[in-house]
Image (cartoon, grey):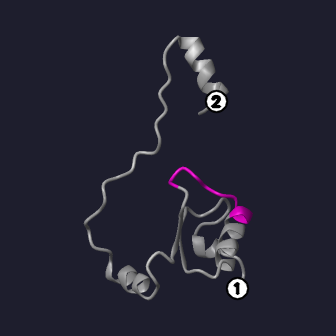
Amino acid sequence: MEGASCEYLKNLYNKEILLTGPILPELSHTPLEERWAKWLNVFKEGSVVYCAFGSECVLEKNQFQELVLGLEQTGLPFLVRLKPPVGAETLEEALPEG
């Protein structure tokens, strides 16, 4: 919430509004599963795109397909960590043809 919304709440409750950003977790020292480490080691460091929208975001099937098609068009390797979209039981089922 920013701008006018924060000003409104500040005036409504006569309290200062303090904004915070996302809380970043501590770096993990747990090693990656071997299959992911092997896959990532094939690519140059910093060249893999990781896409995750969080557990609360569930896309429509057409949005999901546009997202993965767009990632594919970058030509970069990518990982997508999402819930199955609305109307699909699995991610595999929701993938566009080809």
Percent x, y of residue 56:
54, 50
Q: Could you tell me the amino acid type at mark 2? A: Gly
Q: How many marks?
A: 2
Compare residues 30 and 41 and report the one nearer the observer.
Answer: 41
Residue neighbourhood size for the residue with mark 2, other residues' Cα within 10 Å, grouped as few (<14), some (14–19), many (≥20): few
Percent x, y of residue 84:
59, 64
In the figure, 14 relative to 96: above or below? above
Compare residues 7 and 73 and report the one nearer the observer.
Answer: 7
Q: Can you tell which quarter of the image residue 86 is in? A: bottom right
In the figure, 90 relative to 34: above or below? above
In the rendered structure, does residue 58 fall within the stretch colored magenta?
Answer: yes
The residue singled out by tag 2 in the image is: 3
Residue neighbourhood size for the residue with mark 1, other residues' Cα within 10 Å, grouped as few (<14), some (14–19), many (≥20): few
The residue singled out by tag 1 in the image is: 98
Q: Which mark is residue 86?
A: none
Compare residues 54 and 85 and report the one nearer the observer.
Answer: 54
In the figure, 74 relative to 53: above or below? below
How far is disc 1 from disc 2 in space, using C-alphas?
Answer: 44 Å
Residue occupying image coordinates x 69% and y 74%: 69
> Magenta region's main secondary structure?
loop
Residue occupying image coordinates x 71% and y 62%: 63
Residue occupying image coordinates x 32% and y 74%: 32
Tell me which segment is drawn in magenta: 54-63
Q: Can you tell which quarter of the image residue 61 is in? A: bottom right
